[in-house]
Image (cartoon, coloured by chain):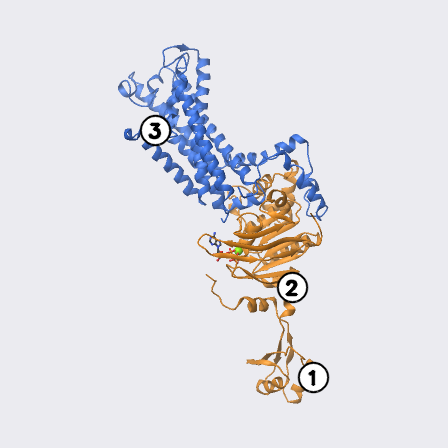
Amino acid sequence: MTDAAEAVVETSGLTKRFRGGQVAVDSLELSVPRGSVFGFLGPNGSGKTTTIRMLLGLIEPSGGTARLLGEPMPRAARQVLPQVGALIEGPALYGFLSGRDNLLRYDAADPTADPRTRSTRVSEALERVGLAAAGSKKAKAYSLGMKQRLGLASALLQPRQLLILDEPTNGLDPQGMREIRTLVRELADDGITVFLSSHLLDEIEQVCSHTAVMSRGKLITQGTVAEMSAGARGRLAVTTPDTAEAMPVLKEHGVTDVTVSGDRVTGEMPATDPPDLADLNAALVRADVRVRAFGVERASLEDVFVALTGEGFDVAG
Amino acid sequence: MSRADTAPSAASAGKPEASVAAGPVAAGPAGPAAAARAPGSPLRELLRPLGLFRSELVTTFRRWRTLALLLVLMAVPVLVGIAVKIETSDGGSVGGGEGDGPAFIAQVTNNGLFLVFTSLAVTLPFFLPMTVGMIAGDSIAGEAAGGTLRYLLVAPAGRTRLLLAKYATTVVFCVAATLAVALSALAVGALLFPVGEVTLLSGTPVSFGEGLLRTLLIALAVAASLLGLAALGLFVSTMTNSGVTAMAATVGLLITVQIVDTIPQLHAVHPYLFPHYWLSFGDLLRDPVYWDPLLKNLGLQALYVAVFGSAAWARLTNKDITA
Ligand SMILES: Nc1ncnc2c1ncn2[C@@H]1O[C@H](COP(=O)(O)OP(=O)(O)OP(=O)(O)O)[C@@H](O)[C@H]1O
Ligand SMILES: [Mg+2]
């Protein structure tokens, strides 16, 4: 079952049509390689959480299949899920129980968990997310970030092969976010596959090896983060007080879409046969353009994301 | 049924261990116990699925709300006992005559044990089943409302196992609620009134010991009377994602059915209403015991458990958990 080359999450034609006819997830072909840190991106309402719920057997697909750790879901839920830790659409806790008792309860719900080591497991999980001191506090008195941490602790109760984290850094303070990033890297180093959805793209860029982008229920692209960023060409940016003189020089050298804003001139480098940057700079100087700064700005994942999913702010209905 | 079903069975014991050992993290620092899933003795393996039931029990009975319900139930016998004591302190009799007030109340001044029967007769039509309706109604819907249902299911608790644990806990609550009334009544009765030899409804005197034994049987009969409602509440609970809605719907159903049970024109359906034979517990105070209504009650409760238990199972195992 644990063939290293095999995908840890694999869906084929996975579709969810909610009652009322709305297609939340449309023929999804997703493949998450073992050992990867996989960033699952998409605007609000694009179907990420719905996909995650189907993967975990919480909702029945209307079509297609999902395999988790090589086993079909939801049929093999009982064998597979003890090896999968999950955070789905934020943590959910029993407010009237302490943080520790919450974890004890979730641990007791796993029939494969040994009751004799339950208490140790819970203590270590609390330790791991930095809640050891607050473990005896009632969960209703937790702050948003503390709840999020407790949710993560419940995902880390057992040694897992796969972690599915839906917006794990939601509500965390900067230190908390850093810790989660470090934690995700540590887990990945241990060979655990981490599948995480997030809206924080620089975060995805920092921790993820692979990524996929959803929009309106459809998968637009998936691949390694490096491939994604490379796919979008960077923009040339020149900072100069002589913007008017700079524009014709750049156009002469094949730079397209030249725009000026303030003392910055930016443009697209030609895709085929781009000019040498040094020559371009020399040409600017020869034309008496006083250059303050010059260079190609690498496209961020955010640029790629917006290019793929569109600028609009409104959520698709 | 279409979903992975996680009912407890001995066959489940071996498989997850094997696959974890093959996984990459068995020795990793993520292992809060590499022995977390080490197989124990076969008996332990069989009992392990009971962990959820135990957790469910602890969670329910540590909840302030549950304790408040039990306290309210315990207060009823105190009120009834004091009322009877005050009314009879001038030597008069309760209600001023025969046939008035709740069953058995006239005998309370002679024997404190009758306060138990009076209190059960007073609480059984509404108070007692209302508390059961609240616990049963909240069981699944409350977890859905809090979002904890999804985490229990990915733990993976298993839908069938969760439903069984929820129902078993509600059954324990039925017993606990009945005992809360009975024990409180027994204490108050012994405190305020004389206790001793019991005269049964058929006029036969029996020893106090046998009286206590019959009281215990009555408490069990009352608790069993609530099982049908508990199953109904569980089913309602699988139908909604709001604990309050499910509680209100179950209690509303209870009231409706109680009203229907009193409308003579609808007598054709009466034998099928779950509260119809509830007061049959009094027949345990006859010599010989008049078993017929008692057995009819048990049969009816079993029918409700079978029908609504299956419906709840069918609903929960096919439900999309979107909360
Ligand atoms: N229970 C439901 N019934 C009907 N439609 C639903 C239900 N749950 C989600 N949807 C719809 O499915 C679509 C996808 O929702 P989903 O929660 O998967 O989005 P998401 O990608 O997780 O968004 P976000 O980034 O805001 O978390 C949305 O259009 C939503 O309205
Ligand atoms: Mg979401």
Q: Which residue is mark 1?
A: A279
Q: Residues within 10 Å of mark 2 (few under 14, many from 20)?
A: many
Q: Amino acid at mark 3?
A: His
**Cα gap from disc 3 to disc 2, whole angstroms:** 69 Å
Q: Amino acid at mark 2?
A: Val
Tell me if label 1 and label 3 are in contact, CB under 8 Å: no
Measuring 50% from the left and 49% from the top, which residue is drawn there? B322
- Residue A279 location, quadrant: bottom right
Mark 1 or 2: the one toward you: 2
The chain that appears orange in the image is: A
- The answer to whether residue B98 is above or below residue A87 is above
Q: Residues within 10 Å of mark 1 (few under 14, many from 20)?
A: few
Measuring 28% from the left and 30% from the top, which residue is drawn there? B265
- Residue B104 location, quadrant: top left
Q: Which residue is mark 2?
A: A225
In this rendered view, identify the residue nearer to me: A43 or B260. B260
The chain that appears blue in the image is: B
In this rendered view, identify the residue nearer to me: A281 or B26. B26
- Which numbered dot is residue B270? 3
Q: Amino acid at mark 1?
A: Asp
Mark 1 or 3: the one toward you: 3
- The chain that hosts pointer 2 is A
- The answer to whether residue B295 is above or below residue A6 is above
